[in-house]
């Protein structure tokens, strides 16, 4: 999971640099914030996976409730952080969403690459 997160962070950092070259500091900040949301999402997933390994549940119902709770938590945090970026911080919407999408895409791609090798 550390390799996946490292790849995700590196790609978000690269995109932030490109955003700075393309549109200056406001674009770079928006891309970085969106990418950071994707990284936080991955960190929460890793934390929940680690918790699941430590606490073995005895039945499928407990596993299912834990999975739904984790998915809801992550979704709610992503929505709240995106809303904060749009509303409170007044970040540029398109660069922030592009940073988030790139961060999520990096997570998916790195997972595929690391499983293959």
Image (cartoon, grey):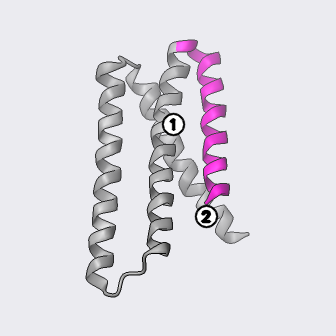
Residue 33: in magenta span: no
Residue positioned 59% across, 61% down in the render: 111
Look at mark 1 in the image and give the residue it sits on. Answer: 35
Residue 37 image-quadrant placement: top left
Label annotation for residue 112: 2
Instruction: For label 2, count other residues whose C-alpha is less than 10 Å away and answer few (under 14), some (14-19) or many (20+).
Output: few
Q: Tell me if 114 is positioned left or right of 51 in this view.
A: right
Residue positioned 33% across, 77% down in the render: 63
> What is the CA distance from the residue labelled 2 to the residue labelled 1?
19 Å
Residue 89 x/y as whole percent:
37, 19
Q: Nearer the viewer, residue 55 or 27?
A: 55
Q: Secondary structure at mark 1?
A: helix
Identify the magenta region.
1-25
Residue 11 x/y as whole percent:
64, 40
In this picture, is 39 found above or below 82?
Answer: below
Residue 107 x/y as whole percent:
55, 53
Q: Secondary structure at mark 2?
A: helix
Q: Quadrant of the N terminus?
A: bottom right
In this picture, is 4 found above or below 80?
Answer: below
Check the image and name the residue furthest to the right: 117
Residue positioned 51% across, 59% down in the render: 46
Label annotation for residue 15: none
Residue 94 x/y as whole percent:
41, 26
Magenta segment's dominant SS is: helix
Residue 5: in magenta span: yes
Residue positioned 35% across, 51% down in the render: 74
């Amino acid at each position: 999971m550390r390799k996946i997160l490292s790849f995700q962070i590196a790609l978000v950092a690269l995109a932030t640099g490109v955003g700075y070259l393309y549109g200056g500091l406001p674009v770079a900040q928006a891309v970085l914030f969106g990418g950071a949301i994707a990284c936080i999402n991955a960190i929460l997933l890793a934390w929940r996976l680690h918790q699941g390994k430590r606490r073995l549940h005895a039945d499928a119902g407990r596993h299912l409730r834990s999975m739904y709770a984790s998915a809801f938590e992550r979704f709610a945090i992503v929505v709240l952080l995106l809303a904060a970026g749009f509303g409170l911080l007044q970040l540029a919407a398109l660069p922030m969403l592009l940073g988030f999408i790139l961060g999520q895409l990096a997570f998916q791609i790195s997972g595929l690459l690391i499983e293959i090798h």
